[in-house]
């Protein structure tokens, strides 16, 4: 099965990401296209709410720059720096294949998420 790819676009630029193979990522792909208002959090990530919950699956605590994840089942996160989150951790959705540093700036941004061509 080919890796599902998505595009995340904003006024700041566009990145591509590959979704992982899990129920949460497959559910996200079925929701697309989406527009999500995102805020900066702790100068390491942009966060925003999805229109509905994704399935709860195994979580992890470590993340790298470019990780796409869920903090809660409807709280989408794009990490532009690496680190570690407290328990219960994040649900991994995918990894950015482009330059995620476009989000490494203070302030809010609206992103459009869609399946890649």
Image (cartoon, rainbow, N blue to C red):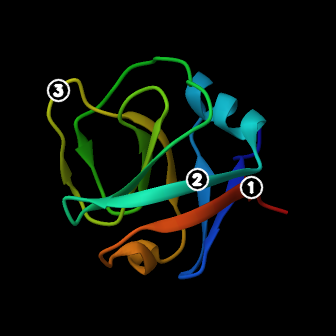
- The answer to whether 93 is drawn above or below residue 107 in the figure is above
Local crowd size for mark 1, using a 10 Å CA cut-off: few (<14), some (14–19), many (≥20) = many
Q: Which of marks 2 and 1 is in front?
A: 2
Residue of label 3:
87
Residue extending farthest to the right is: 117
Q: Which of marks 3 and 2 is in front?
A: 2
Q: Where is residue 98 in the image (x, y as percent from the top left)?
A: 53, 74
Q: Position of residue 89 (x, y in %)?
A: 26, 31
Kindly report the distance in space between the C-alpha atoms of the residues bearing marks 2 and 1.
11 Å
Residue at image x 35%, y 72%?
A: 107
Q: Which quadrant holds residue 106?
A: bottom left
Kindly report the distance in space between the C-alpha atoms of the residues bearing marks 3 and 2.
25 Å
Image quadrant holding the C terminus, namely: bottom right
Q: Position of residue 12 (x, y in %)?
A: 53, 82
**In front of the other: 19 or 89:** 89
The disc, 2 or 1, on the residue closer to the chain's N-terminal end is: 2
Q: Which quadrant holds residue 61?
A: top left
Residue of label 2:
36
Residue 116 falls left or right of residue 52: right
**In front of the other: 50 or 114:** 50
Residue of label 1:
114
Look at the image and tell me whether residue 22 can be seen: no
> Contact, CB < 8 Å: mark 3 with mark 2?
no
Count of numbered labels shown in the rendering: 3
Local crowd size for mark 3, using a 10 Å CA cut-off: few (<14), some (14–19), many (≥20) = few
The disc, 3 or 1, on the residue closer to the chain's N-terminal end is: 3
Q: What element carries label 1?
A: strand
Q: What element carries label 3?
A: loop
- The answer to whether 115 is drawn above or below residue 65 in the figure is above
């Amino acid at each position: 099965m080919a890796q599902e790819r998505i595009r995340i676009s904003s006024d700041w630029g566009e990145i591509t990401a590959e979704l992982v193979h899990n129920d949460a990522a497959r559910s996200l792909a079925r929701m697309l296209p989406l527009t999500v208002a995102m805020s900066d959090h702790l100068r390491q990530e942009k966060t925003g709410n999805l229109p509905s919950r994704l399935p709860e699956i195994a979580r992890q605590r470590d993340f790298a720059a470019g990780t796409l994840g869920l903090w809660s089942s409807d709280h989408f996160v794009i990490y532009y720096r690496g680190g570690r989150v407290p328990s219960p951790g994040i649900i991994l959705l995918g990894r950015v294949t482009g330059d995620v540093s476009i989000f490494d700036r203070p302030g809010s941004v609206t992103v459009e998420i869609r399946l890649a061509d």
